[in-house]
Amino acid sequence: MKPDAALDYEVIVIGAGVAGIYMIKRLTDLGIRATVLEGEADIGGTWYKNRYPGARFDSESYTYGYSFSKSLLDGWDWKEHFSPQPHTLEYLNYVVDTFGLRAHMQFGTRVERAHFDDAGSFWRLSLGDGRVLVARFVVMAVGLLSTPTLPRIPGREDFKGQAFHTFHWPQEPVALAGKRVAVIGTGATAIQLIPEVAKQAARLTVYQRRPNWAAPLNNRPIPPSEMTEIRARYDEIFAQCERSPYGFVHEPDRRGFYEVPREERIKLWDRLYDEPGFAIWLANFREIFSDEAANAELSEYIAMRIRQRVKNPELAEKLIPRDHGFGVQRVPMESGYFEAYNRDNVDLVDISETPIDRITERGIRTVEHRIDGTEVWHEREFDIIVYATGFDAITGAFDHIDIRGTDGEALREKWRDGPTTFLGMMIHGYPNLLMPNGPQSGSASTNYPRGIEVGVDWCTRLLEHMHARGLERAEATEAAEAHWSTHVADMYQKLLMRKAKSWFTGYNSNVDGHEAGRIRYFVYNGGMPKYRSVIAEVAANGYEGIMFTGVQNHAEA
Ligand code: NAP
């Protein structure tokens, strides 16, 4: 066992986003020698990177802030119910500066390899700048949607205009006025972006492979008087988030779908559709997630609302999903998305009918396969192409680091067919590797900060437990990991989500092995209250499922 004094740090945290910031706060409060390694030039993670116009919370702002410090809550005013990216990044800077956390962070520092030294019980991290750091523990705070993916369309490099993924939207303002812009993709990101680009660009062409259900965000400003009222209710708001399955202020309607007469169901949906945030998704009947007929009825209702909003009936039909029901994929929230298609400067190209054949020097070429067997090409010219094509979700950021455990096996090999974990926070064969918001954890399917605080607190308490007992090594047992991963997989069986082509099930057509039909059990679907009680019980039972080793004799404790 390598002595502590020979380590560079006791704990290295990878990532300075929402999870990494809170993790380093807890560690430094305990006087633990720790650092955060961040590949980007500054803090913020997802909120540092996603600078595309329209990027904002889909969570109510006042449920997204950290809840652990009253003075932090007292010192910050949210300006909108759903905060836009620049203000959110300002918030995270406010947190970091308030607690002087930047002093414990190293920027522009990308971790390339993390190898566990079995004999010495420590992690050796090789960095992009050539340094090697050793630490007893590594905390993965690498983000769940932080590895963008580009479509495998020939000719991408040929395009002579500006082209970027939404995740890499340039920091300096992009001049959209007078430009011909293409957006490829219609996920949550594109659905925020499209109305904003439509307002500025000369021409916007959206390339849609599959439409996505979306519903109004109903954002509005928070005047100072309302912020005072929100501040007075913080305890109540966070208690409500704790009670609700996914960490939001929205709680499901617990009446049985079929016990409520149809007219009343419609009345409820009329109300929820006009409410802010995820109400229409998460304050709905629980059956919409598991019962085909209930889901179909809600989907038909949402389709009707889309038809009301899109003037061209043919176009409206193209914007209505047919291959999945409302809410079985993550519902994008929108601010004038459907109305954007009523503008004269916006076109939709349905690439399920006329696929993209290639990117050219000047734009995008689609091909139409006619019934008579002939093919017709159509090239549209652009100044800017935006790829809103999503992420190698949940495990992508892990796969980008060469992580090797006790027997030298690469984590990306172990997880080739999908992740297996203990509580989403530990991995058998990878001792002292902690994931406060890892795959299969409660936070992966929750209002992130609400889940992240739970995960970070649990990991911190585990470290305290070990410290108090002179334990230097913790590893999930094979049995505990198998049990948890089976439990996570079992929960998918009840949900319509399992059939959806979405990142919740590991689908990404741009990543090998992530094709539809090869389901990956990425998220814990039992809800945060249950997750919290399970992980608390594990801790109360002396961390059942975790094998500890002590300092002096390597004996199992
Ligand atoms: P996404 O939901 O995975 O959507 C990607 C889009 O790109 C889909 O429309 C997809 O079409 C399309 N696409 C991918 N590859 C393509 C290809 N080769 N050719 C043509 N089209 C292609 O990604 P996202 O919109 O970035 O959102 C990901 C997640 O980020 C969201 O679900 C959400 O959790 C999070 N997010 C959160 C917020 C927020 O909280 N405010 C905002 C934005 C995003 P198919 O559907 O056919 O695959």
Image (spheres, grey):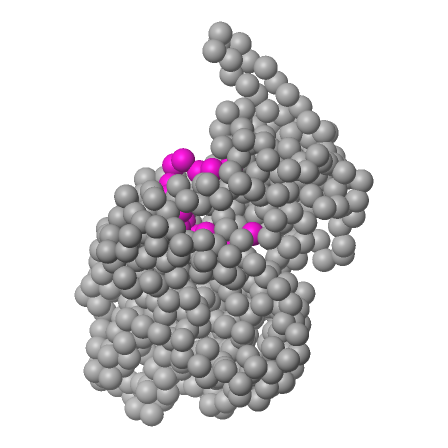
Q: Nearer the viewer, residue 157 or 56?
A: 56
| Quadrant housing the C terminus | bottom left
Residue plotted at (60% across, 27% down): 358
Q: In the figure, residue 547 lies in which quadrant?
A: bottom left
Is 540 a magenta residue?
Answer: no
Position of residue 544 measured from the top left corner of the image (x, y, whole percent): 21, 77
Residue plotted at (47% across, 37% down): 320
Q: Nearer the viewer, residue 459 or 218?
A: 218
Position of residue 461 measured from the top left corner of the image (x, y, whole percent): 36, 84
Is 321 a magenta residue?
Answer: yes
Q: Residue furthest top?
A: 372
Q: In the figure, residue 438 lies in which quadrant?
A: bottom left
Position of residue 133 measured from the top left corner of the image (x, y, whole percent): 52, 73
Magenta residues, start to end = 319-334
Give the prevailing secondary structure in the magenta stretch: loop
Residue plotted at (76% across, 54% down): 173
Residue 324: tell me if it is visible. Answer: yes
Residue plotted at (28% across, 79% down): 536
Q: For this view, does 282 lie left or right of residue 489?
A: right
Q: For this view, does 279 lie left or right of residue 53?
A: left
